[in-house]
Image (cartoon, rainbow, N blue to C red):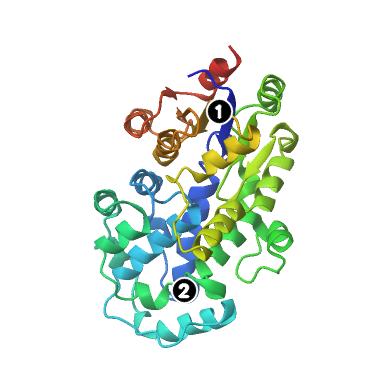
Amino acid sequence: MEPELLIWNLDGPVIDTSDSYPSTIRRTVQDYFSMFLNIQGVGSLVQREDIQAWRLAGGFHNPIELTTAFIRYLLSLLPGQFPRNNAPRGVAEAISFLRRGSQPLQNLSREYFEERVDFQGVAKQIGEAGGGRRGLIKVIRSGWSHSLLMDEGEGNLVRQLFLEIYLGRKQFARLERQQPRLYRGPGQFENETLVLEVSVFERLHGRYRGRMALVTSRPLEQARVVTRERNLERLFDTIVAGEDVSGEEARLRRVGEPESLEPPHPYMVLEAASRLDPGGSRGAVYIGDAPVEMRAATRAAATGERPVTGWGLITPAAETALLRQYLMEAGAEEVFDSPAALAARLLD
């Protein structure tokens, strides 16, 4: 299908997160176990191929959710179980709770996990169980993961750690409106680069003026910072971000129709297309680098609201043959083996 509307997933096709996200995931896992449970070296067990395998299992579109899943799995390997009485209020109370509750674990080491961990095998089981957090919970036993994860509300330490490491001290304070508590170094996002040159997006903006959007699970202001600092913000006509998803989910709950709108749900794709072409029926191409995004495009097309198709991009750090297979199986109409090939197709 020739594109009339261009919808880009921010992470992957636009911003190269192939180093920043894996580095942040591994560092977050490491700091979670060393800071709160006094177990060293656990983060180094998570390899890039494990991160890709869990992403391909489906359901882990958001890197914080993926990080949480790795920690949940590793906690499930701990011996025994520590019961949680009352959920902590806020980050400080959560940290104190973890440090008190983890006393029986003080003698564990990286080697304990190394003998038991099987990221690749569990990834396969997660995929077979439907993917994502629900799939993971079906696969693992609960154990300490229910007691020590602290992944909800104000005590969400995984989110706190991940964002401090990813954003760095200055951007975290600016975007989260609080000072970092756990990490004060530079942000991993500073190492990110553009997948395509700004000049390519400028030419696309001229060709698709008023018809080019971004979608992302990131908060809107974070997405704006990332695009603004790379001179991209003016080149996209709208951004559908995390707040749009959570806001619509809240509306659905109020009317008694609760539903998760995270990909592969087509909400973000259809919302972006609707903003670009209100009330119209122009066809949309959704460009992503993960199977879940191709499934979202397929499901958007199935609604009958307008023609939608997915184009998959294989970024340089990906395993080309494997990812191509997964993208095609997920419904991609076209798969591009390089950013240059995608640019040539769009500007032909």
Does 238 sit left or right of 339 as displayed? right
The mark that comes first in sequence, 1 or 2, is 2
* Residue at the far top in the pictured view: 348
Question: Which corner quadrant of the image does residue 92 belong to?
Answer: bottom right
Up/down of 159 relative to 128, above or below? below
- In the image shown, does 215 or 26 lie closer to the viewer? 215
- In the image shown, does 194 or 3 lie closer to the viewer? 3
Crowdedness near tag 1: few (<14), some (14–19) or many (≥20) residues, C-alpha within 10 Å: some
Residue drawn at x 66%, y 51% as measured from the top left: 220
Q: Which residue bears the numbered disc 1?
A: 281
Up/down of 221 relative to 234, above or below? below
Does 78 sit left or right of 249 as displayed? left
Crowdedness near tag 2: few (<14), some (14–19) or many (≥20) residues, C-alpha within 10 Å: many
Task: Tell me the tag on residue 150.
Answer: 2
- In the image shown, does 250 or 123 lie closer to the viewer? 250
Residue drawn at x 50%, y 45% as measured from the top left: 267
Residue drawn at x 64%, y 35% as measured from the top left: 278
Is the residue under label 2 in contact with that under label 1 (CB below 8 Å)?
no
